[in-house]
Image (cartoon, rainbow, N blue to C red):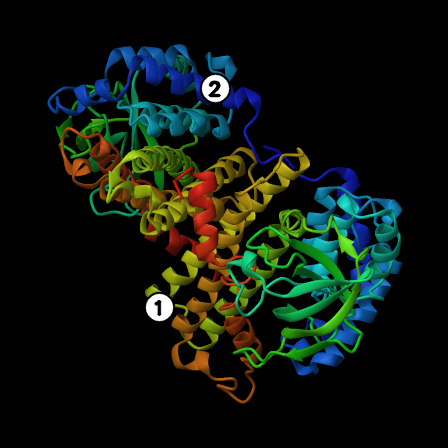
């Protein structure tokens, strides 16, 4: 029994964490947050991540990747969440996963090395406005190699060179399609998310030419959604842990009534419960990543548990961060809102906590 | 990540499964079977069965062979917990002795204590109780007032203990006693091993809100115990008690998950029977419980990993206690919420008996109190894990 990260995985986590602390700290994040019209994609950060293999982690070695698994990838996602780091990491990794899972050898050779090296930014469009994250919420149709419809919200579409789009064919079967930046009939509209650590847009397709992924069937769409759910949950867990750690550190020192406010049981018990919740969410993400890596028969349950628990943990920990920092935590100058807004933007992605719970009921009732 | 057990451990699982299949009567697997027996009948049946289990080599899984144990691995203990729950094996009758006292004796007991206490305990010839809590010393355990006064080579003990599991069946009781007159708090305490079969010891059952009597009260009136029947040194009872309680920490979460997950499935089946399974609110509430139970399972694997690596779990056990006790209680709250009025009826239909559900439901109120209440556990997590000031 070894339910833990290996020494190599821990070292990988430290590398990313230390890189962010040295080269892209909260002041740098603030620069991105306070420049809402910028592309939200600082190249120093992107190149640094690429140098560390953070973009290549899941790409097979034959395509210049590291050929590792989701347990390794969630290490990166957690570190990025903890650092509230901007950029299209998750979007690019998922686009590469779509190619790895469903692309032909030729498609993989063409795109994976560039995605792994960070030379091409990728993104995925798997759902339309108001839709569910289970394949049923797709609002793009495909006919004769042309896409029509819309997808929203999509991470970093303005900087993406390659978009993996889920679309349904005339028989209603979902599949995955490649669309290149600048394709005819493709419109990208910035949706101005309040989460300044990300850039999000809506896509409109009007007879946009698209190339089907060789085996981009329903199974591939579900596999991609599951991977998205787990890596998004990992980011949320990173956000939650860092929010809690910062709150605890502040409440150890902040004095009111002549004593540290962290000595009051009203705070202690809330923070203790959060610590348990965040720890359980960390376990759940680790287990779900491993389940996907090993094709565990309980994978569907594991993914839903991780998605639900991580969303709730991040939601609650970041709300508590503002509350337990007190008034300063409500100000623009404080960093609490970076964590809070990131948690709330990400919590509903790839299935909200409640949607994951409904999936659990459907799986066990 | 490697969530598999070794070949040797899986071999053990097969042996245990085979033995359990041959030694668990079918009627024992019926829901609520044990509740149909009187307390004494249930106790004697379990005592006899467990003695057979010991003879077959399936007790003291992780104990050294020299103490009559199997000398197994932590993984085997987790498998044992999982398989015995899966097979509907009854709970051990000597739980406090086996879980707490035995490992403490192995660690700090005298050679005489090791030789005289452990074997009979493992064979269920001697049933051990724990005498810690008192009416005035619950969460504040150091407030114990039961006192022992030296008279020759014996202590004379007076006082009262409460919440004593198996009080009516106990033969001996490991007891925190204030042996130094005028001492306060953690000082002047000793862990005395007192014979309950003597005139100065009286046990009375304590009827719980569920109607059952797992607990009792124990009164000491000039009870006598040899001064050498002390575990650890005289006056070092607090240290002995803390060591003893540290043995609660282990990988028992694997077995707990198996048990609670079965209860979840049973509750879902009742929700379906009473037409409540399509209600979106009910589905959300039960699924929320499942999330916490699955997290308990992952946490158990994490803890097992720590144990296998020989790491000190320290205050992490408080987190484990919070997770399992709160998740278990929430599950039974969900039972009430989801079933509504039917949840409150032992016989909502002629062919439906919900009394075993009520027993669990009401029991679930106790688990966030005993063994360190949730409030005490939160203080421990806040202060010793998060480092918040006292």
Which percent across, then down, holds residue A3?
A: 58, 36
Give residue A16's quadrant in the image.
top left
Q: Nearer the viewer, residue B17 or A167?
A: B17
Q: Along the horizontal axis of the image, is A25 left or right of B236?
A: left
**Residue located farthest toward the bottom when viewing the structure as drawn:** B350
* Chain of residue at mark 2: A
Vertical order, B135 against A269 (above or below): below
| x then y, percent, for residue B11 | 80, 45
Could you classify mark 2 by the number of other residues whose Cα lies within 10 Å: few (under 14), some (14-19), or many (20 or more)?
Answer: many
Q: How many marks?
A: 2
Residue found at x 47% / y 47%: B380
In the rendered view, would you say B328 is above or below B45? above
Q: Which one is nearer the viewer's eye here, A214 or B164?
A: B164
Q: Are marks 1 and 2 on the same chain?
A: no
Which is closer to the viewer, label 1 or label 2?
Answer: 2
Circle 1 — which element? loop
* Image coordinates for residue B96, horizontal then vertical, percent: 70, 60
Answer whether residue B247 is visible to the viewer in this image: yes
Q: Which residue is mark 2?
A: A12
Q: Any mark on residue A181, and which?
A: none
The chain carrying label 1 is: B
Say which residue appears at 44% left-offset and 50% top-offset.
B378
Q: Is residue B93 visible?
A: no
**In the displayed structure, does residue A235 sit left or right of residue B3?**
left
Q: Quadrant of the N terminus of chain A?
A: top right
Q: Nearer the viewer, residue A323 or A13?
A: A323
Could you tell me which secondary element the residue under label 2 belongs to? helix
What label sits on residue B279 in the rendered view? 1
Indicate the position of residue B211 as horizontal and vertical percent values.
Answer: 57, 81
Q: Quadrant of residue A341?
A: top left
């Amino acid at each position: 029994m070894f339910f833990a990260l290996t020494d190599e995985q821990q070292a990988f986590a430290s590398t990313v964490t230390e890189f962010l602390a040295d080269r892209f700290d909260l002041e740098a994040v603030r620069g991105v947050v306070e420049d809402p019209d910028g592309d939200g994609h600082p190249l120093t950060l992107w190149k640094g991540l690429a140098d560390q293999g953070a973009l290549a982690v899941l790409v097979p070695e034959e395509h210049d990747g590291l050929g590792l698994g989701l347990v390794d990838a969630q290490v990166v996602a957690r570190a990025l969440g903890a650092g509230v780091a901007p950029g299209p990491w998750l979007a690019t990794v998922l686009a590469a996963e779509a190619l790895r899972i469903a692309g032909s050898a030729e498609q993989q050779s063409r795109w994976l090395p560039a995605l792994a090296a960070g030379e091409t930014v990728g993104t995925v469009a798997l759902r339309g406005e108001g839709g569910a994250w289970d394949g049923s919420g797709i609002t793009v149709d495909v006919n004769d190699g042309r896409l029509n419809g819309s997808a929203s919200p999509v991470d970093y579409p303005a900087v993406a060179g390659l978009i993996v789009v889920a679309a349904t064919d005339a028989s209603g079967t979902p599949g995955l399609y490649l669309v290149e930046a600048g394709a005819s009939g493709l419109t990208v509209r910035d949706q101005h998310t309040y989460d300044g650590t990300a850039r999000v847009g809506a896509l409109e397709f009007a007879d946009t030419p698209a190339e089907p992924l060789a085996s981009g069937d329903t199974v591939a769409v579900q596999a991609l959604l599951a991977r998205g759910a787990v890596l998004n949950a990992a980011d949320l867990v990173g956000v939650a842990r860092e929010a809690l750690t910062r709150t605890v550190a502040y409440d150890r020192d902040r004095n009111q009534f002549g004593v540290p406010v962290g000595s009051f049981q009203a705070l202690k018990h809330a923070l203790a419960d959060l610590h348990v919740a965040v720890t359980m969410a960390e376990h759940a993400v680790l287990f779900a990543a491993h389940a996907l890596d090993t094709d565990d028969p309980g994978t569907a349950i594991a993914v839903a548990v991780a998605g639900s628990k991580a969303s709730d943990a991040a939601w609650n920990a970041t709300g508590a961060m503002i509350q337990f920092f007190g008034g300063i935590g409500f100000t623009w100058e404080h960093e609490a809102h970076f964590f809070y807004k990131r948690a709330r933007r990400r919590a509903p992605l790839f299935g909200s906590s409640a949607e994951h719970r409904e999936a659990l009921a459907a799986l066990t009732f | 990540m490697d969530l598999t057990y070794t070949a040797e451990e899986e071999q053990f699982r097969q042996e245990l499964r085979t033995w359990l299949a041959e030694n668990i009567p079918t009627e024992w697997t019926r829901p609520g079977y044990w509740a149909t027996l009187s307390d004494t009948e249930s106790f004697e049946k379990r005592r006899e069965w467990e003695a057979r289990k010991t003879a077959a080599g399936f007790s003291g899984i992780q104990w050294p062979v020299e103490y009559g144990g199997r000398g197994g691995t932590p993984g085997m203990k987790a498998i044992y917990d999982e398989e015995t729950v899966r097979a509907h094996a009854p709970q051990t009758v000597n739980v406090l002795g086996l879980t707490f006292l035995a490992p403490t004796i192995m660690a700090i007991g005298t050679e005489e204590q090791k030789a005289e206490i452990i074997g009979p305990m493992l064979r269920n010839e001697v049933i051990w109780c724990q005498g810690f809590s008192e009416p005035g010393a619950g969460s504040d355990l150091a407030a114990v007032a039961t006192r022992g006064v030296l008279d020759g080579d014996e202590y004379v003990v007076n006082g009262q203990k409460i919440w004593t599991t198996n009080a009516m069946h106990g033969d001996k009781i490991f007891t925190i006693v204030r042996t130094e007159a005028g001492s306060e708090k953690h000082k002047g305490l000793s862990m005395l091993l007192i014979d309950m079969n003597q005139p100065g010891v009286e046990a009375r059952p304590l009827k719980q809100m569920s109607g059952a009597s797992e607990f009792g009260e124990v009164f000491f009136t000039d009870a006598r115990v040899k001064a050498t029947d002390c575990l650890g040194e005289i006056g070092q009872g607090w240290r002995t008690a803390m060591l003893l309680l540290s043995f609660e920490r282990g990988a028992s979460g694997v077995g707990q998950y198996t048990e609670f997950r079965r209860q979840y499935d049973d509750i879902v089946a009742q929700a379906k029977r009473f037409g409540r399974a399509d209600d979106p609110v009910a589905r959300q509430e039960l699924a929320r419980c499942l999330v916490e139970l699955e997290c308990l399972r992952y946490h158990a694997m994490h803890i097992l990993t720590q144990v296998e690596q020989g790491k000190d779990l320290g205050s992490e056990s408080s987190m484990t206690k919070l997770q399992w006790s709160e998740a278990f209680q929430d599950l039974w709250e969900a039972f009430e919420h989801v079933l509504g009025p039917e949840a409150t009826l032992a016989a909502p239909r002629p062919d439906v008996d919900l009394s075993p559900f009520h027993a669990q439901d009401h029991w679930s109120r106790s688990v966030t109190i005993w063994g360190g209440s949730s409030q005490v556990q939160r203080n421990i997590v806040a202060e010793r894990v998060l480092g918040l000031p006292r």
